[in-house]
Image (cartoon, rainbow, N blue to C red):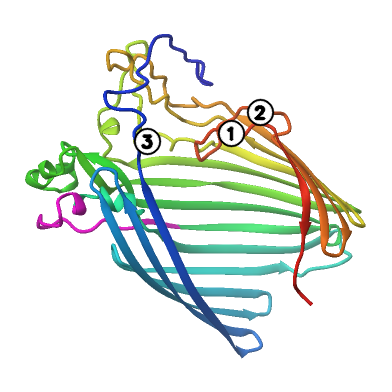
C-alpha cells in the first residue's frame, strides 16, 4: 500500500535464478595532498590559489573486472573584492581526471547591503545575495568498469571514455535582520540543471545514444553512459532568533524537480500494471516528466538550543513530505502486477532528535544523544533503511593544544 492510496496484493519475485548470496567486491583507496595560499593585494582585494593532487587505487570484481589507478591533479584561483556595501567573489577550478580528462568549473558570488547593519533598529540590515556556478562529479570506478568504452575494450571508433556528471545553477536571495540582529530571516530562489548523469542503458537502446549496432551488440547486455538529465528549482525559507539563552531555528524547502532526459529501458517503455491501465510506471527509474525518486516536494527542519554556563540542550526535528518512488517488484510471472504508481508513493515522515552535553572540565565534556526519539519508521533521501531509536552517551576528551 502506497502513500498515494494505491494498493496491490499478490506474490513477488524475491530472488532470480542464480546462487545467493551474490558477492560484489569493490575497494577504493584515495590519497589527497593539497595546499593553498592567499595574497592580500589591497585592503579590500585578495587573491587565493591552490593545487590538489589525488591518487586513487581501486578494484571491482563485478561484470568486467577492473583494476584502476587514477591520478587526478587540480587547481583553483579565486579573487575576493569589496567596495562599500558590495562584495564579490569569483573563481574557477581546473581538474584533470585520468578517466575523462580536463574540466573547468567557474563560480561567482556577490552580495550587497541595501540597508546597513544596526544594533538598535527594529528593522535591521537588508542584504541581497547571488551565486552561480558549475560543478562536476567523477564516475566511480565501478561505473567506469561497466562503461561503454571499457566494455567494448576501447576498440570501437567514436566511443569515448565515460565523462563526468555535470551541474550548473544559480540562486538569488534576500536576508533581513530584525530586533538589532537578534532575529534573521532569509528567502532564496534556486535553479539547477544536472546533465550527463550516468545511467545503465541496455544494448537494444544504445543505438539511440548514437552508438553503432556493432558496438551495442559488443556490450552483451548494456553499459553505463552519460545519458540522463534533471532540472530542479525551488524556494528555501529560513529564520533564526536568539532569545536570551534560547536559540530557535526553522527552515522550509519547496523543490520542483523533474527528469528531463533518460535512456533507461523502463523509461522508454514504461511498465503498466493491469490494475491501473492508464498510469505509466517507472519500475527501476523515474519517468521523463516525473520527479526523481526520493526527492520530496516539501521538507523542513526545526531546532531549539538552550545554553546555560556549561550545559547545552538541543532539540531538533526534520520533516519530509511525500516522495515519488517505486516498489521495484516483479510478480511471480515476471509481470507488473506488484507495481504501484510512482507519484507520492513514499509517505512523509518526521524525525526528532534530542541531545545534551555538559562541560565539567576544560578538556572533558559529557554528552548524551537520542536519535529518532519517536522511533519513526521512515525512508531517508539516500534510500537506505532508517535507524530506529538510538541512544548514545559518553565523554569526549580534548587532547593537545597550548
Residue bearing the label numbered 1: 386
Q: How many angstroms separate mark 1 from mark 2 (CA)? A: 8 Å
Quick check: 230 left or right of 153?
right
Query: Up-down: is 363 above or below 232?
Result: below
**Mark 3 falls on what kind of element?**
loop
Task: Give whichever of 371, 56 is nearer the camera.
Answer: 56
Position in image of residue 255 (x %, y %): 53, 42
Quick check: 16 left or right of 385?
left
Q: Quadrant of residue 331?
A: top left
Could one spot residue 316 in this view of the protein? yes
Pointers 1 and 3 in contact (CB under 8 A)?
no
Quick check: 76 left or right of 361?
left
Task: Give whichever of 174, 330 is nearer the camera.
Answer: 330
Q: Is 167 covered by the magenta stretch?
A: yes
Query: Up-down: is 27 above or below 56?
Result: above
Where, quadrant-wise, is the C terminus in this rendering?
bottom right
Q: Nearer the viewer, mark 2 or mark 3?
A: 2
Q: Which residues are magenta?
A: 149-168
Q: Main secondary structure of the magenta part?
A: loop
Q: Which label was assigned to residue 289?
A: 3
Amino acid at each position: 500500500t502506497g502513500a498515494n492510496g494505491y494498493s496491490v496484493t499478490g506474490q513477488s519475485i524475491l530472488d532470480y535464478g542464480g546462487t545467493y548470496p551474490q558477492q560484489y567486491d569493490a575497494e577504493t583507496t584515495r590519497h589527497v595532498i593539497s595546499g593553498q595560499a592567499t595574497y592580500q593585494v589591497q585592503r579590500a582585494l585578495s587573491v587565493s590559489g591552490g593545487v590538489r593532487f589525488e591518487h586513487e587505487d581501486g578494484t571491482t570484481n563485478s561484470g568486467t573486472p577492473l583494476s584502476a589507478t587514477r591520478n587526478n591533479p587540480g587547481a583553483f584561483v579565486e579573487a575576493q573584492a569589496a567596495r562599500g556595501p558590495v562584495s564579490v567573489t569569483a573563481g574557477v577550478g581546473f581538474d584533470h581526471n585520468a578517466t575523462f580528462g580536463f574540466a573547468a568549473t567557474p563560480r561567482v558570488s556577490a552580495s550587497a547591503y541595501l540597508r546597513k547593519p544596526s544594533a538598535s533598529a527594529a528593522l535591521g540590515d537588508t542584504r541581497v545575495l547571488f551565486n552561480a556556478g558549475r560543478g562536476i562529479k567523477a564516475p566511480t570506478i565501478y561505473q567506469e568498469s561497466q562503461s561503454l568504452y571499457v566494455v567494448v575494450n576501447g576498440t570501437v571508433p567514436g566511443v569515448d571514455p565515460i565523462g563526468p556528471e555535470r551541474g550548473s545553477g544559480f540562486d538569488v536571495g534576500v536576508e533581513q535582520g530584525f530586533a538589532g540582529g537578534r532575529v534573521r530571516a532569509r528567502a532564496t530562489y534556486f535553479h539547477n540543471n544536472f546533465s550527463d548523469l550516468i545511467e545503465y542503458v541496455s544494448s537494444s537502446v544504445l543505438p539511440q545514444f548514437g552508438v553503432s549496432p556493432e558496438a551495442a551488440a559488443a556490450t552483451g547486455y548494456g553499459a553505463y553512459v552519460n545519458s540522463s538529465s534533471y532540472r530542479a528549482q525551488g524556494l528555501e525559507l529560513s529564520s533564526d532568533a536568539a532569545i536570551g539563552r534560547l536559540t530557535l531555528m526553522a527552515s522550509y524547502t519547496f523543490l520542483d524537480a523533474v527528469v528531463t532526459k533518460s535512456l533507461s529501458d523502463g523509461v522508454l517503455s514504461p511498465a503498466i500494471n493491469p490494475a491501473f491501465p492508464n498510469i505509466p510506471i517507472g519500475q527501476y527509474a523515474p519517468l521523463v516528466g516525473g520527479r526523481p525518486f526520493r526527492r520530496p516536494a516539501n521538507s523542513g527542519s526545526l531546532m531549539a538550543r538552550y545554553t546555560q554556563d556549561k550545559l547545552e540542550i538541543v532539540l531538533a526535528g526534520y520533516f519530509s513530505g511525500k516522495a515519488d518512488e517505486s516498489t521495484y517488484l516483479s510478480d511471480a510471472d515476471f509481470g507488473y502486477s506488484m507495481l504501484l504508481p510512482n507519484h507520492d508513493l513514499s509517505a512523509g515522515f518526521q524525525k526528532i532528535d534530542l541531545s545534551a552535553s555538559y562541560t565539567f572540565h576544560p578538556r572533558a565534556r559529557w554528552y548524551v544523544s537520542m536519535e529518532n526519539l519517536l522511533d519513526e519508521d521512515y525512508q531517508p533521501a539516500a534510500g537506505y533503511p532508517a535507524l530506529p531509536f538510538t541512544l548514545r552517551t559518553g565523554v569526549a576528551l580534548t587532547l593537545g593544544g597550548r
